[in-house]
Image: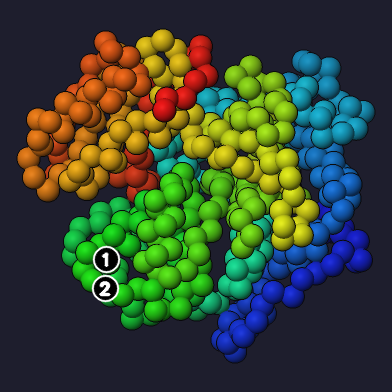
């Protein structure tokens, strides 16, 4: 199997790793590469290429992307019954029509419903060695799909490249605060031994009782990690508990806290960074969409453009100008076995218009505002981000946790965790604030609960809307 793309040898490679322990050097340079070869993954050469291509001239990067896009679409046309029939129906020929990345705009969007209905027809006839994956389903019915070795190799390599931006390598001690049933169910003996070898420790984020949080803090202090990785809500929850216990966590030598899979709120970034004494790096992606973008030490959210084409589209699926917000749609170029072409993430964001100061030429995402289901719709049709409602709740005294569910245009339910019984004045202020933003006739039900349950995936969602934001007629944002 030939390497999927070539990078000009003149591309500069930035030496990033300093002060690596002998153990980390052995794991990153010998043990992990052998592990990946045994699994028939090409993670190491892909990561090496990615570290060169991140500094390519924009025209070279675009040419690389176009070459891989043409290859993906040509294989889909030959091997995927779903895409072969769809291309024929619209008169699209990959060999003839893919002269630029903009050719993607001729193809219809792909969403979860289409994948569920056509999974066996999307799979390439020549695919082999596929692994079955499932999304957590925090925003609805879980999605079942398949991933080949090429996709896994590229996703692992992309994350590996990003951790090295922060001087963290494979083999450095890592604490992972995660809640996916997939990871937890796979904690068999072989994987436990592999995690010990790689010095990766899993802290399950499902049920965070006080006793379990005490145990998490003790484990982090006993084996200080170089890197924390997990949901921002989970890491913030641990940080808040550590502060309440008076446990010092900012002297452990943590280099970076990676957060992903949820929107990172400014107060979470500040809390995690302050508690663990380290920068917080935001990552954006998913099990289905792949490793889309990650933040570098200069603050830029760099798109993994060698592997992923990102489009920002409006409610009609049409591209919007750079800098304008819209739905994030991705085409993963390493998914020939089970193509993800123009896949709707359900997230909202924008493409940056200025380069990052770090010198990498990878395009940038900005204003990643969360899922479309994290937006709420007022009675008059105005669409606003859930932050408009979060601001109402978080300013109230005595609130330890909350969740806002927009059941319909006319009904909003607010769950609160309080140390004391809910005060009538607080309730009235909360209801008034919600109605000011959503409409005076909206019914607001306020419930005091003992705890906010996480989603099945272990994530926490502060705002859930069961109203389709795309149906809104306005575009205003509440103050």
Depicted 263 relative to depicted 321: above or below: below
Element type where label 1 sits in the image: helix
Pointer 1: residues within 10 angstroms few (<14), some, or many (20+)? some
Location of residue 323 (image quadrant): top right
Q: Please tell me how many numbered marks the rendered image carries.
A: 2
Image coordinates of residue 263 in percent, x first then y, are: 46, 44
Label of residue 80 in the image: none
* The residue positioned farthest toward the bottom in the image shown: 22
Q: Which residue is mark 2?
A: 247
- Tell me, yes or no, whether the two marked residues, 2 and 1, touch with CB atoms within 8 Å: yes
Depicted 108 relative to depicted 244: above or below: above
Element type where label 2 sits in the image: loop
Compared across the picture, whether 52 is left or right of 200 comes to right
User: In front: 120, or 375?
Assistant: 375
Image coordinates of residue 302 in percent, x first then y, are: 67, 51
User: In front: 197, or 185?
Assistant: 197
Location of residue 184 (image quadrant): bottom left
Q: Residue at x 50, y 64 (%)?
A: 279
- Could you tell me if residue 193 is visible in this image? no
In the picture, which quadrant includes the C terminus?
top left
Q: Residue at x 72, y 64 (%)?
A: 47
CA separation in Å, label 2 and label 1: 6 Å
Label of residue 243 in the image: 1
């Amino acid at each position: 199997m030939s390497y999927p793309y070539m990078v000009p040898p003149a591309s500069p490679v930035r030496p990033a790793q300093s002060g690596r322990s002998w153990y980390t050097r052995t794991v990153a340079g010998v043990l992990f590469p052998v592990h990946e070869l045994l699994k028939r993954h090409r993670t190491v050469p892909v990561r090496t290429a990615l570290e060169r291509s991140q500094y390519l001239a924009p025209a070279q990067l675009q040419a690389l992307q176009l070459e891989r896009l043409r290859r993906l679409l040509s294989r889909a046309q030959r091997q995927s019954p779903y895409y072969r029939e769809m291309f024929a129906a619209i008169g699209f020929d990959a060999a003839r029509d893919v002269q630029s990345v903009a050719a993607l705009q001729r193809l219809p969007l792909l969403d979860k419903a289409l994948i569920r209905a056509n999974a066996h027809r999307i799979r390439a006839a020549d695919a082999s060695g596929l692994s079955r994956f499932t999304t957590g389903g925090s925003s609805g019915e879980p999605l079942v799909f398949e991933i080949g070795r090429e996709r896994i190799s590229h996703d692992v390599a992309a994350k590996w490249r990003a951790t090295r931006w922060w001087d963290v390598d494979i083999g450095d001690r890592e604490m992972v605060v995660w809640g996916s049933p997939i990871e937890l169910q796979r904690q068999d003996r072989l994987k436990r031994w592999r995690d010990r070898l790689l010095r990766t420790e899993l802290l399950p984020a499902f049920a965070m009782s006080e006793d379990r949080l005490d145990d998490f803090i003790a484990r982090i202090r006993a084996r200080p990690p170089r890197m924390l990785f997990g949901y921002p809500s989970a890491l913030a929850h641990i940080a808040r508990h550590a502060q309440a216990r008076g446990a010092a966590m900012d002297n452990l030598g943590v280099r970076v806290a990676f957060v992903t899979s949820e929107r990172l709120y400014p107060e979470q970034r500040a809390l995690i960074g302050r508690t663990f004494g380290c920068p917080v790096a935001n990552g954006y992606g998913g099990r289905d969409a792949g490793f889309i973008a990650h933040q570098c030490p200069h603050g830029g959210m760099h798109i993994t453009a060698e592997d992923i084409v990102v489009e920002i589209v409006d409610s009609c699926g049409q591209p919007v100008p750079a800098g304008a917000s819209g739905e994030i749609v991705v085409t993963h170029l390493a998914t020939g076995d089970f193509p993800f072409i123009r896949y709707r993430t359900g997230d909202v964001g924008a493409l940056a218009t200025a380069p990052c100061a770090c010198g990498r030429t990878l395009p940038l995402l900005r204003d990643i505002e969360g899922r479309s289901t994290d937006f709420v719709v007022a009675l008059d049709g105005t669409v606003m981000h859930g932050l408009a409602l979060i601001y109402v709740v978080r300013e109230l005294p005595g609130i330890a946790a909350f969740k806002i569910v927009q059941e319909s245009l006319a009904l909003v339910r607010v769950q609160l965790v309080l140390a004391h019984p809910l005060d009538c004045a607080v309730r009235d202020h909360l209801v008034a604030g919600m109605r000011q933003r959503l409409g005076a006739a909206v019914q607001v039900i306020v419930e005091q609960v003992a705890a906010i349950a996480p989603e099945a995936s272990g994530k926490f969602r502060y705002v859930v809307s069961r109203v389709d934001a795309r149906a809104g007629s306005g575009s205003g944002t509440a103050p």
